Amino acid sequence: ARFHGPCYHHLFYDVLPATMHALSADPSPKAMARASATYNMVIEGMLAETGYHAYFTVLDEQKILPGQRKGISLLKQDEARHIAYGIFFLSRLMAEDESLWEVVEATMNELVEPALGMIYESLGSYDPIPFGLEVSHFTDYAMSQFQKRLERVQRARTMTMDEIYAVTHLAIEEDDA
């Protein structure tokens, strides 16, 4: 429970369930864009990525648990596929209705502060922080992940459906190479 601070509570007890449950009553593109921005872009694309990065960093720097390190690197690859799908999904929605960009941008901007706060809460619960970790390294990493996701979705807002599929197919081919 000590890791479930106010920011964690806000994101995982309030925002995420409310956003996902809202889809039952309102399956509109706007509700789907909000849900995907919340889950794929912030929860997965920012927080999960940062958590895996932190865990991998400790294992790698300490040169411990090579099997666990390999497992985390595979988890990171899987998470990247989820995030790529979220970007693809949001891109398709925006190709059909460019005004959904406002929903995505507003949702991500609304959640960035509590997401960063959650990182502070998690690492700040230790005194001292183990393994010489620094909170700023992980908040910087999380912000870079956030910015990458935001920019990628923003680029898609003016793309046609054909362009979105072409970019997606190129990315898949690069991953298969």
Image: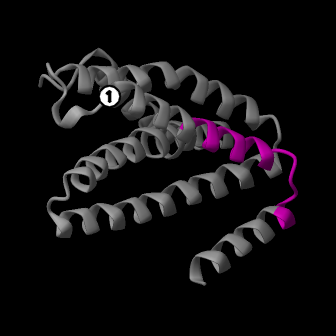
Residue at figure coordinates x 67%, y 70% from the top left: 171
Of residues 13 and 52, the one nearer the viewer is: 52
Residue 70 image offset from top left, x and y in percent? 27, 68
92 in relation to 153, above or below? below
Q: Which residue was labeled with disc 1?
A: 134
> What colouring does the structure picture have?
one colour
Of residues 70 and 34, the one nearer the viewer is: 70
Residue 122 image offset from top left, x and y in percent? 25, 26
Mark 1 belongs to which amino acid? Glu
Residue at figure coordinates x 87%, y 46% from the top left: 158
> Is residue 150 magenta-colored?
yes
Of residues 16 and 113, the one nearer the viewer is: 113
Residue at figure coordinates x 14%, y 19% from the top left: 127
* Predominant SS along the magenta part: helix
Q: Which residues are magenta?
A: 146-163
Residue 103 image offset from top left, x and y in percent? 68, 30
SS state under label 1 = loop
> Is residue 70 magenta-colored?
no
